């Protein structure tokens, strides 16, 4: 999220949440085992191309999900889309997780698995080819997907950095 200049206000979007992973964790203490739950959640507004992720930990699953949603609303990112797909191919990396995103023609659908699918559908991408490489850990996969989404540039941005008009590209 390095290129995020201004914070997006979660209240102005119609956010839908999607639980990606729930992990039961146990801490062994003198008196026995303390059970806790960690939830990884993706929220997004498909209509406006906004998506975010967060994780929450609590003693019960619903509370963990609620905390995850609150956390996800705090780091929303705007995704550059061209009609129903992404503008260009991109490879996102986080840790040993890598996610390859490729634009796809109309009618292809979201070809993605697990964590990547949750992010793509929440962001409002309707046609995309993806490949998750390296680590299958959902946390790393989601962060790699967000890395890829933040690398996306639309034609206007590319033209501006090159000092040309959009028509020249």
Image (cartoon, rainbow, N blue to C red):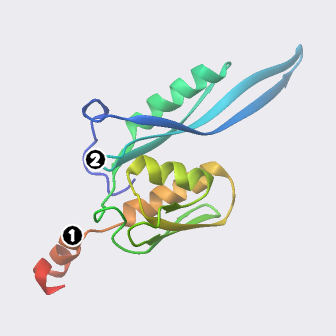
Can residue 161 be seen here? The reply is yes
Which residue appears farthest toward the front when viewing the image?
Answer: 107
**Is 103 placed left or right of 94 in the picture?**
left
Residue at position x 72%, y 24% in the image = 36
Q: Which mark is residue 20?
A: none
Which residue is painted at 41% across and 58% down in the image? 126
Q: Quadrant of the C terminus?
A: bottom left
Q: Which mark is residue 157?
A: 1
Q: Please indicate, yes or no, whether residue 164 appears anywhere in the rendered image.
A: no
Residue density around tag 1, few if under 14, some if 14–19, many if 20 or more, within 10 Å:
few
Q: Is residue 135 left or right of residue 15?
A: right
Residue 54 spot, x, y in % from top left:
50, 38
Question: What residue did someone put label 2 on?
Answer: 48
In the displayed structure, does residue 16 sit left or right of residue 135?
left
What is the secondary structure assignment of the residue under circle 2?
loop
Asked which quadrant contains residue 157, the reply is: bottom left
The residue nearer to you, when weighing 106 against 32, is: 106
Which residue sits furthest top? Answer: 31
Q: Position of residue 158 (x, y in %)?
A: 23, 75
Disc 1 to disc 2, how far (Cα)?
18 Å
Identify the residue at the far bottom of this view: 168
Relative image position of residue 48 (x, y in whole percent) = 28, 47
Q: Secondary structure at mark 1?
A: helix
Q: Is residue 159 above or below residue 21?
A: below
């Amino acid at each position: 999220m390095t290129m995020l200049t201004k914070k997006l206000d979660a209240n102005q979007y119609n956010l839908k949440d999607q639980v990606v992973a729930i992990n039961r964790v146990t801490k062994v203490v003198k008196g026995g085992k303390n059970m806790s739950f960690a939830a990884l959640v993706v929220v997004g507004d498909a209509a406006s191309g906004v998506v975010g992720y967060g994780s929450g930990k609590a003693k019960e699953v619903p509370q963990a999900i609620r905390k995850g949603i609150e956390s996800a609303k705090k780091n929303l990112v705007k995704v550059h889309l061209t009609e129903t797909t992404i503008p260009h191919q991109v490879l996102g990396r986080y840790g040993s997780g890598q996610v390859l995103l490729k634009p796809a023609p109309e009618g292809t659908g979201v070809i993605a698995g697990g964590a990547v699918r949750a992010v793509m559908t929440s962001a409002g991408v309707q046609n995309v080819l993806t490949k998750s490489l390296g680590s299958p850990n959902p946390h790393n996969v989601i962060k790699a997907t967000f890395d890829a989404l933040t690398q996306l540039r639309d034609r206007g941005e590319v033209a501006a950095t090159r000092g040309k008009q959009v028509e020249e590209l």
